[in-house]
Amino acid sequence: MEQKPCIVQRDRTVLLETAHPSFQKARAELAQYADLVKSPAAYHTYRITPLSLWNAAAAGLTADHICISLRSLSRWELPAALEEDIRRLVARYGQLTLKMHPARDGRLLLQSRSASVLAELKGYPSLASSGLVILSELEAEAPSRLRGLLKQELTRLGYPVLDHVGYQDGQFLPLDWRDGDRSASGQREPERQEPLSEQTGTPRAISAAASAQSSGQKGRSAEQEGAERVDGIPAGSVAAPKGSFRLRDYQRAAVDAFKESGGEGGSGVLVLPCGAGKTIIGLAAMRELQCETLILTSNATSVTQWISELLDKTTLLPEQIGEYTAEHKAVRPVTVATYQILTHRHRKEEEQFHMKLFNERRWGLIIYDEVHLLPAPVFRATADIQATRRLGLTATLVREDGREADVFSLIGPKRYEMPWKALEEQGWIAAVRCIEVKVPLPGPIKERCRYSGKREQYRLAAENPAKLELIKALVRRHPGAQILIIGQYLNQLTAIAEQLQVPLISGQMPQQRRHELYASFRRGETPVLVVSKVANFAVDLPDASVAIEVSGTFGSRQEEAQRLGRILRPKSGENRAYFYTLVSSDSREEMFAMRRQLFLVEQGYVYEAMSIPLAEEQGRKPGQIGAAAEREVSGQR
């Protein structure tokens, strides 16, 4: 009888054997209620946490379902104490419910299913500062203005709250798709969203006409890209209807999950891969709610893309949409702003003046794009606006600062998640080969590392000059492809751009010039771009099919996922893409690379290993490493 794939331990860790025939099935099961924390070759280590269980419960999983799943995967009998832990933690989700007080204006009623819960909680001084007053064994009350802080603190103490208080409607704003036919089956399919088969919901092949465009950008001149702007909105942006479309099945399911989550409908996070159309889902949520909306996103490029989609896909007019960034401060019925402008201040002791945007209008919905990047000050502001519906959009719930619980309590639980590989199998995103290339450190740099601090050791390894010849070889191996070279350190990126004679986009470059270069890349006029971390998020480059990562922010899992996301848009033809990550072998960079890859490994991606011998070790001149690298790469394709 074949052994089962997992070793389930009392401390809520699960070891999954990677060589087991049921590895993929077990990985998909565990991803529903556990987090991947280590991924060495033989066994992947998962941890079941309170938050992973509460997100599972919010998605409809029961303790019985989770325990049955673990028994089906476990090599040995499930530890009784572990099962007890799981049942206890899952039971806490839904133990407390928050409602509007029926008899007292401005007060909230906290109801418990068990007298023991409030008896335990009343001993915490932090809850008293959240305004909580115990009324009876099963009820307590608090001021409605402290709704967010109370939820945040109760979650921290291990008791997540079901928030049934409800939401303000916000100012009415009529909005529909830009199409004469408003029926679900008659909506225009957004560009780069291929038509669905009415029977199967699977994508048809991308037409030649569609593949000749890139989100409506190919064929546009630099002059059109840099057209005169009014309050940040491109002149002449309103597009004519271009046929009919409807939401993809998973997009419709995501919107429904946000809207109809029991008494909590109207707050939560939707998790989908880059390229899955999260912006379209945001527009669909706005269409459902018909209210004024504040959209917060990661950078000015993303602001421009949101505005472009709003004008192209909906009936909103330019004068109804405002851009709120460093360059423009227009507050309109739909306003798109960056996280950075909200938190900006000239001196540390100053107030964050732009936080007033949360109260500038009677918003009915706030969309948090790339919600995993939400800065701490915005958390505090979000705690004060719990009466407004909140939609978080992200490719990953991973936060490097460990504040996932704040997203859970203040934005809402995970309402919907679409596995990356599931969308790949359906053809909605490109199939990506991930290749980790080990590059030896030259002797002099190894010697410097011996006498350097840990941070400097990492940087020396990340900026390994031996990577340059390999980058050239990789570019040669993909003739005709649109290639992104992505890194962390400007000196390194500048040297690469100069050697390849290609443009470099960094935070120092003005926004207008960035837009021009991105447009040139989309049109195919600039086939290779070197980009800094400014391109990590929300940059729509649909025809990019090769990404070469030369350095990164230590062990950031979210950065790795976002960088791979730059090449996930569906491609014409074979619909394939390549993600190379260059890592100095036997260095601190190697250790951080393992952590960076955790999230993508959890999603089912496999990093193929490739090693390049150092030229000096083979008696070659340094410049000859490119030929050896090219032969090695050729064997990998």
Image: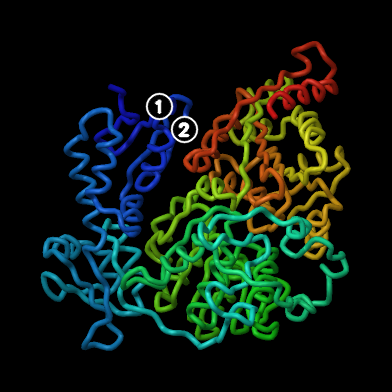
**Residue linked to disc 1:** 20
Residue at x-position 61% and y-position 43% = 431
Q: How many marks?
A: 2
Residue 142 sits in which quadrant?
A: bottom left
Instruction: Say few, some or many: other residues with alpha carbon within 10 Å of mark 1 (under 14 / 14 to 19 / 20 or more).
Output: some
Q: Is residue 11 left or right of residue 472?
A: left
* C-alpha distance separating marks 1 and 2: 15 Å
**Residue linked to disc 2:** 39
Q: Residue 221 at what x, y percent from top left?
A: 87, 65
| SS label for mark 1 | loop
Instruction: Say few, some or many: other residues with alpha carbon within 10 Å of mark 2 (under 14 / 14 to 19 / 20 or more).
Output: many
Residue 609 sits in which quadrant?
A: top right
Compared with 195, 105 (above or below) is below
Compared with 270, 31 (above or below) is above
Residue at x-position 51% and y-position 55% = 272
Q: Residue 135 at what x, y percent from top left?
A: 15, 76
Q: Identify which amino acid the numbered label 2 is placed on.
A: Ser
* Disc on the earlier residue, 1 or 2: 1
